[in-house]
Image (spheres, rainbow, N blue to C red):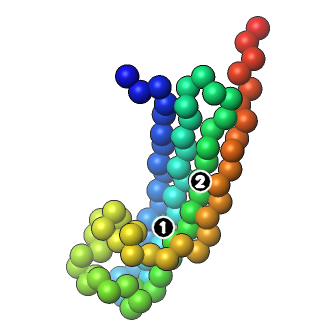
Amino acid sequence: MPSYWYVLQRYFLRVDDVMVRSHETRMFHMLNTDYVLREYSTKEAKAQDINIPTSEMKEADDVIAFLPVKEKITEKLLVNTQTN
């Protein structure tokens, strides 16, 4: 049984023939540790710069791999595990 949790939050925007943008936050926590790892990333490109037909840009997972990273921040968040 896994002793961790993982969360992916994604905002995906596609404007046909204009641009594609993605904001993602990933969080990972190993149980019995005092921290959570958080990664935030922004990816964006003009539609003309991506060599994918617009008709194939319907699913975020199919497009995001082709987008360049504009910003990426990784943080280690400390969690208070004290109990009374």
Q: Residues within 10 Å of mark 1 (few under 14, many from 20)?
A: many
Q: Earlier in the sequence, mark 2 or mark 1?
A: 1
**SS at mark 2 in the image:** strand
Dot 1: what SS? Answer: strand
Image x and y of residue 34, in percent: 68, 29
Q: Are marks 2 and 1 in contact (CB under 8 Å)?
A: no
The location of residue 68, given as percent across then percent down, is: 49, 77
**Left of 51 or right of it: where is 35?**
right
The mark found on residue 45 in the picture is: none
Question: Comparing marks 2 and 1, which lies closer to the viewer?
Answer: 2
* In the image: residue 30, left or right of residue 19: right
Q: Residue at x 48, y 34 (%)?
A: 5
| 21 w.r.t. 48: above or below | above
Question: Which residue bears the numbered disc 1?
Answer: 22
Seen at 65% across and 60% down, the residue is 73
Is the C terminus in the top left, top right, bottom left or bottom right quadrant?
top right
Q: Quadrant of the N terminus?
A: top left
| Position of residue 36 in the picture relative to residue 60 (left or right) | right
Residue 45 vertical position relative to residue 75 in the rendered view, above or below: below
Hey, what amino acid is under mark 1? Ser
Residue 25 x, y percent position in the rendering: 55, 53
Separation of marks 2 and 1 at Cα, in angstroms: 14 Å
Q: Residue at x 48, y 39 (%)?
A: 6
- Mark 2 closeness class: few <14, some 14–19, many ≥20 residues within 10 Å: some
The one nearer the camera, 5 or 18, is 5
Q: Is residue 7 visible?
A: yes
User: Mark 2 is on which residue type?
Assistant: Glu
Is any atom of residue 18 visible in this view? Answer: no
Q: Which mark is residue 39?
A: 2
- Residue at the spot 69% in from the left edge and 44% down from the top edge: 76
Please, is residue 51 above or below residue 80 in the view?
below
Q: Quadrant of residue 54?
A: bottom left
